[in-house]
Image (cartoon, rainbow, N blue to C red):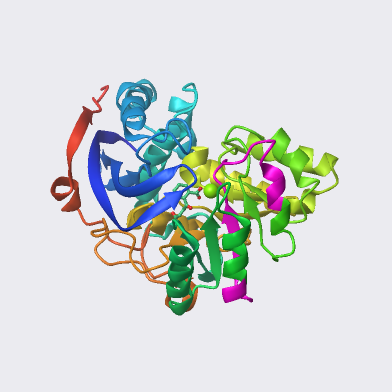
């Protein structure tokens, strides 16, 4: 394709319920959206699911993402097109910015916009384009509450809405008790916990108290940049450990599989695949397929994404190699006061059905770009001929 222009918008999304993790509470999120226009008149959109600050991971905050996109990633794409005439494939696109270290979240939105355009050009859903064969699958919710009662209330709403898989945020001082209360209230639910790297080598042993609660997994107990120590503590936990923050690439996933295999516990490794954390859907698909080849379970994680980002992740969830329910829905109805798609996503009885349609199979609400935010950068990609 020949890209004509790339616009970067920053819009404000307001959560209907505050979301608390081990590293803070979110109410309002400022989100960059990349909009690519092609010479043949197609338009693609990619969201960067930023959080307000770099507490989850480096380079996940809006200032860092906007700087990476404006200064390096978008100019690199333009330069590449001017050098080779057109960006024909996703591989060409990724090659244009492969030299830039990090910036995974920023890069992922450019790739997402490109996939959106390519799916439109083929008149196919992203699910079909990516080889997804499942048209229906169960989805889960993530509960970011502040105390046991709050978590139980949110869980009750989610269960009322039909969700069969719950994940709860934990941190030191708020872990075994809340998990036990949830298990007692919902004896048969698929239940998992997410620590967002809140434990260290002196505090993690308390997590052994979760064994026996029949949890699916414990997500990212230790440091955000660690794989090795996670593999070591996994030897002493019966509950599988799931990596989120530490996985940026297929290589990271392979390193994890190597360590867990060496310890003889590969069946206790699970990987949360968040496309924006691994620089986009191409890398995400490689991770999902490689994990599946080695019997390592994966699921699609979320970043409190807007309906647009969630719709893309749901398309990815149609891959049969994804074997656990993902974080796609809020426990209490819509995530945001006003979302960026024209109709809210729904999962009756906790099951999402891929609708008929093209690309994300949902409609982007173009009015949000100016009503909830503004354009912060415009790049005309000059013709070279
Ligand atoms: O670690 O999975 C996480 C939300 C913000 C930051 C980190 C995480 C989360 C979630 C995802 O738990 C919730 C969702 O998007 O549905
Ligand atoms: Mg997580």
Using the rendered view, name the quadrant where residue 60 is placed. top left
Q: Nearer the viewer, residue 173 or 37?
A: 173
Q: Nearer the viewer, residue 28 or 321?
A: 28
In this image, 46 relative to 160: left or right? left
In this image, 375 relative to 115: left or right? left
In this image, 120 relative to 182: left or right? left
Q: Which residues are magenta?
A: 184-207
Quarter containing the N terminus: top left
User: Could you tell me residue 373's position as x and y percent?
Assistant: 18, 43
Quarter containing the C terminus: top left
In this image, 202 relative to 285: left or right? right
Q: Nearer the viewer, residue 359 or 191?
A: 191
Using the rendered view, name the quadrant where residue 224 is placed. top right
Q: Nearer the viewer, residue 181 or 92?
A: 181
Residue 65 visible in the picture = yes
The residue depicted at 44 percent of the width and 26 percent of the height is: 97
Residue 353 visible in the picture = no
User: Could you tell me residue 25's position as x and y percent?
Assistant: 38, 47
Indicate whether residue 202 is drawn in magenta.
yes
Indicate whether residue 15 is drawn in magenta.
no
The residue depicted at 42 percent of the width and 60 percent of the height is: 125
User: Could you tell me residue 130's position as x and y percent?
Assistant: 51, 54
């Amino acid at each position: 394709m020949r890209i004509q222009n790339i616009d970067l918008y920053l819009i404000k999304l307001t959560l209907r319920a505050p979301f608390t993790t081990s590293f803070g509470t979110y109410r309002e999120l400022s989100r960059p959206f990349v909009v690519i226009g092609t010479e043949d008149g197609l338009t693609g959109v990619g969201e960067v699911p930023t959080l307000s600050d770099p507490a989850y991971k480096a380079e996940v905050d809006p200032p860092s993402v906007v700087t990476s996109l404006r200064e390096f990633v978008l100019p690199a794409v333009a330069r590449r097109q001017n050098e080779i005439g057109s960006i024909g494939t996703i591989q060409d696109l990724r090659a244009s910015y492969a030299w830039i270290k990090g910036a995974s979240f920023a890069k992922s939105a450019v790739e997402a916009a490109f996939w959106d355009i390519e799916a439109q050009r083929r008149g196919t859903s992203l699910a079909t384009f990516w080889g997804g064969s499942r048209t229906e699958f169960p989805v889960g919710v993530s509960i970011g509450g502040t105390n046991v009662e709050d978590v139980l209330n949110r869980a009750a709403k989610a269960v009322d809405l039909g969700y069969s898989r719950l994940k709860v945020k934990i941190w030191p001082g708020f872990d075994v008790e809340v998990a036990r209360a949830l298990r007692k209230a919902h004896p048969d639910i698929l239940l998992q916990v997410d620590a967002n790297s809140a434990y260290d080598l002196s505090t993690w042993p308390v997590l052994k108290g979760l064994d026996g609660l029949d949890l699916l997994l414990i997500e990212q107990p230790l440091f955000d940049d660690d794989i090795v120590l996670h593999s070591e503590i996994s030897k002493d936990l019966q509950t599988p450990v799931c990596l989120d923050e530490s996985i940026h690439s297929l290589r990271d996933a392979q390193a994890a599989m190597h360590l867990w295999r060496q310890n003889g516990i590969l069946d206790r490794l699970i990987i949360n695949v968040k496309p924006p954390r691994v620089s986009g859907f191409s890398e995400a698909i490689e991770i999902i397929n490689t994990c599946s080849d080695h019997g390592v379970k994966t699921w699609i994680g979320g970043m409190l994404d807007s309906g647009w980002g969630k719709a893309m992740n749901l398309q990815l969830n149609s891959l049969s190699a994804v074997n656990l329910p993902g974080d796609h829905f809020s426990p209490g109805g819509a995530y945001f006061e006003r979302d960026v798609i024209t109709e809210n996503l729904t999962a009756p009885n906790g099951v999402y059905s891929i609708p008929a349609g093209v690309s994300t199979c949902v409609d982007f609400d173009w009015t949000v770009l100016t009503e909830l935010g503004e354009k912060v950068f415009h790049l005309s990609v000059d013709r070279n001929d």
